[in-house]
Image (cartoon, rainbow, N blue to C red):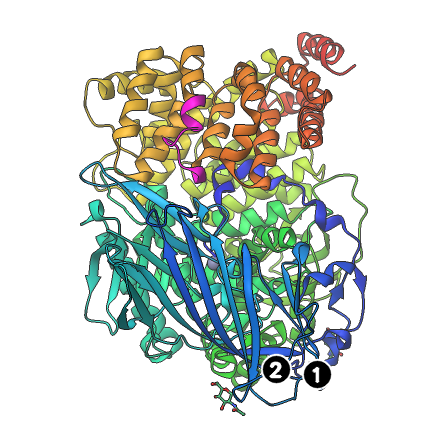
Amino acid sequence: MGAFKNQRITKFLEMSKVLIWSLVLIVLVAADDYPLPFERDFPEVFRGQTSRSGEEVYRLPTNVLPIEYDIFIDLYFAERAEKPFSYDGREYIIIQALEDDVTQIVLHSNVDYISTISIFADGTPVPLIADKPFELVHQYHFLKINMVQPMLVGLNYTLFISYSSTMNEGPMKRGIWRGWYIDENDVERVYATTHFQPYNARQAFPCWDEPFFKAVFTLHLSRSTSYVGRFSNTASASVTALSSGRVQDNFLPTPKMSSYLVTFLVSESFQVIAEDKSFTPAIRIIGRSNAIGMGNHALNLAVKMTSFFDDYLQMPYATLNPNLMNDHISSPDWASAGTENWGMVSYRELHMFINPRETVVSAEHYSATLISHELAHKWFGNLITCYWWSNTWINEGYASYFGYIATNEMFPQYRFDDHFNNRYLQASLSYDSSASTEPMNHEVNTPAQVTAHFGTISYSKAASFLRMTVDIMTPETFRKANQYFLRTNAYEPTNQYDLYDAFMKAINEDMSLAPYSDFNFTEYYRTWVNEPGYPILYVNVDHSTGDIALRQTRFFLSPSATPTDQVYPIPITFSTKRNPNFETRAQYMMGVERMVVTKDAGEEWVIFNNLQHGIYRVNYDTHNWEMLASALKNDHDSIHHLNRAQIVDDVFALMRAEKIAYNLGFQILDFLKQDTSYYVWFPAISGFNWFRNRFLHLPEVLAEYDEILHEFLDAVITELGYDVPQNETLTRTLNRFYVLSFACSVGHKGCIDDAIAKYQTYRNGNPVSPNIQRHVFCQGILNGGYDDWAYLYQKRIDSNNQAAAVQMLRGLGCTTNQQAIERHLNSILSEEVKAQDRLNAFTFLFQGDRGNGRAALPFIKERIDDIRKGVVLAASFNSFLTNLASNMDEEGLVELEEWLQTNPIPEASVGLNAITSARSNMHWGTQNADVILTAARGSATVFLPTTIVLIASLVALFLI
Ligand SMILES: *[C@@H]1O[C@H](CO)[C@@H](O)[C@H](O)[C@H]1NC(C)=O
Ligand SMILES: *[C@@H]1O[C@H](CO)[C@@H](O)[C@H](O)[C@H]1NC(C)=O
Ligand SMILES: [Zn+2]
């Protein structure tokens, strides 16, 4: 699955999202109960790790296996007037029983209507129970078929099912759905396509819809002859003419694979918009008819990365199966960022059409990592597949790891090796520090649990875990292990035990753990895969002897969390002032709570966790922190930029966790006033914002805090400038993009004045670089009138580039003009904003100004049902309510609360909970403002009585 669905944009909110289901108590039972007939003998050490809960009733029994599907789907668009946008299906599934008493076959079905079910063995009908041949259990999407006699083991049965169903409107509900776009002649064009991951193939055809049940799929699609653009996992082998203007494509059989990877797209006008025929089959980019020429950038990425993987894995894609295509679909509508359907990967168009004149560098970056991510899935995910979503970290961790590390090999200009930390490592540390976080291997059962497991842990933590493991076993051994893993498990479901076996085989052959005496890799692997969280390393240096005492314990962000005795085996790396090696190969392995390492005697700073490759935070004795603070201030280049970034990221977390004092924290952070590195500023912005978001209700505190931030920002802004020069590094461009967005949002006058001037230039028809548009649009709209808003609104409607249009959508949300807000709200619920963008569009508006939620309330109350329908998914509607409350001022909260207390909607409690947490954030700010301001001011002694009085009065106002 393409990373990060649509919450990607509301990153900061996402981090604090509470996963209610993770609180469900998990019952531990032995793995032997687990009904997997093919489970191999796993090392004893892993047994007892598989947890189960009563929700396992959502899982299919494994006593019957599908071997082959032959599926016929007749697609109808408008041509069947009495039943538009629907389909009829027939399928023949060859199945086998694995046990000898099976009289009931259970599979998934979520189609509208099943008309016939029959079973044959050797061409003879098998009798079904007359008064109840089959039953549907809606909650589990189960179709249960009742036979009179038990099935014979080892015999092939053919299960025939005919059914009919309806296409979903828009991408969000997945299954078979229809999308649309306006073509070059202003004609609305409809297309139908599929999105089955993780459990939506059952909407298209009844099937064993769990990744474990791999089978061969042969698709036959019929359509009206005018729908000439049709694509699927494999090539169309033949076309059968049907009556009344219809034809049927017979696609070649797929390799043995999981049901979620089946796909097709049928349209009147989609076509190949870029292609490289030097590969067999050709690598093709497919898109809407008015996108010719827009796919070249994506093609270049796909071509280079395919070559990379072919070589690195020594299993060229073309050899995996002769029938598979090598297509990449750019879909104007898509529920996630991209989906790795085998042979036909689909992407949201936003990430495919990169054009440096129109596309912001962050989108170009994302596109490169996404395409590599989906390509990596062709092996890690499709060829081998996690047997169940509890282990989705194997699919997603590998794809995410290669999305950065492999891409860096082919496109070093992006510096993805360095960017990995901001995107994955730090995101993982942030998310994984709560008491309710879950391990990578985590039992999930219900659809909501499955969806939620496609999150930070399975992507970011798993990718970071793989990188940390590479630092221990070396890149060569890792490469070898990957090849073993793929070869041994190709076309089969797999899990963490198989991966462990492959690691061990390669490690033993290469003796790559020889440098680490007493290191138990089994325990390392078991801990990181099965235990939640990560450690903090306490470092205490005795400079007279050179002894460095280390102690680790699980890190919790909450100061009141109960400590655990969990030990995490971690690679120890460190640099010192006199030996600034900043090397990432593990120097020691620490598998115990305490140990001592040594350096040369003598006063000097030390830094642990070189380049922040290990999944842990570090805290030092005060003296070392002070030496670091002064080294950072006087000569920050003596410390690697990734370790400067690590220090920033750790220091903010340590202050919040009350593990170092704010005074010391800000003393260390003081170097930001001279440092202009992107890597350093990225975590700094998020750290500064976290505090600032808790001061928004305290005008005087906020004003002073912002003043302080301006001081921090001056040097980096001066270095970067307000314009985007030609020929600078992409990382520098990206830095300006984030720094100026932040600077303007905290009221930096130079930034705002420049942005307003640039917006006027833009209004006069001159281009503004996409890499500064975010803050230019926002400030232009915020400080402008209705006409300024309407100008950008029209630009967005006219845009043919989704990435550009999303930037504009964000800018439009910055208005505080009542007329503009009203028009904007109506626009969001109309066809002008695609379903996939609606939640973000609302969030941009609420974030645009703290008063906007309140201004939108009358509209929200009146149109709440349309909003629920407009954002489509229950989870999106809940996020809508949460985002509304989290961005409101107290006046707005009161009004929202009064309304929700009348129970106008079933989801009222979601909104009320968000109000409570918004108030508790304010409360935290009120409580801590004084000490933080004092520390940030850089003076531990100044005491400002006015602030105290102000805080006291605000407490009185808000919190009683
Ligand atoms: C069962 O069907 C599969 C798939 O068509 C075939 O390969 C296999 O030989 C059949 N087995 C028997 C016992 O007929
Ligand atoms: C390594 O750790 C595992 C537990 O993860 C344990 O069962 C095994 O005995 C350990 N091996 C050694 C040599 O200590
Ligand atoms: Zn993925």
Residue beneath the point at 32% across and 59% down: 223
Q: Which residue is mark 1?
A: 149
Q: Residue at x 67, y 60 (%)?
A: 442
Q: Secondary structure at mark 1?
A: loop
Can residue 725 be found in the magenta stretch?
Answer: no
Say what secondary structure mark 2 lies in.
Answer: loop
Asked if the residue at label 2 sits under 8 Å from ligand 1, the reply is: no
Kindly check if marks 2 and 1 are in contact, taking CB atoms under 8 A apart as contact.
yes
Q: Quadrant of residue 137?
A: bottom right
Q: Is residue 257 visible?
A: yes
Query: Disc 1 residue type?
Result: Gln
Task: Give whichever of discs 2 and 1 has the lower sequence position.
Answer: 2
User: In which quadrant of the rendered image does the C terminus lie?
Assistant: top right
Using the rendered view, name the quadrant where residue 572 is placed.
Answer: bottom right
Q: Position of residue 660 (x, y in %)?
A: 69, 38
Is residue 831 inside the magenta stretch?
yes
Q: Position of residue 673 (x, y in %)?
A: 46, 30
* Residue ID at (19%, 49%): 292
Count residues near mark 1 (Cα–Cα under 10 Å), then give few for <14, some for 14-19, many for 20+: some
Query: Does 396 sit above or below residue 922?
Result: below
Q: Amino acid at mark 2?
A: Val
C-alpha span from label 2 to label 1? 8 Å
Confirm or reject: label 1 Cβ below 8 Å from ligand 1. Answer: no
Q: Which residue is mark 2?
A: 126
Say how many tags the image has.
Answer: 2
Residue 844 in the image: state x and y as whole percent. Answer: 47, 28
Res. 582 in view: no
Magenta highlight range? 825-836
Give the vertical position of 840 relative to 930 (above or below). below
In the rendering, at what x and y percent does residue 85 appear?
Answer: 40, 49
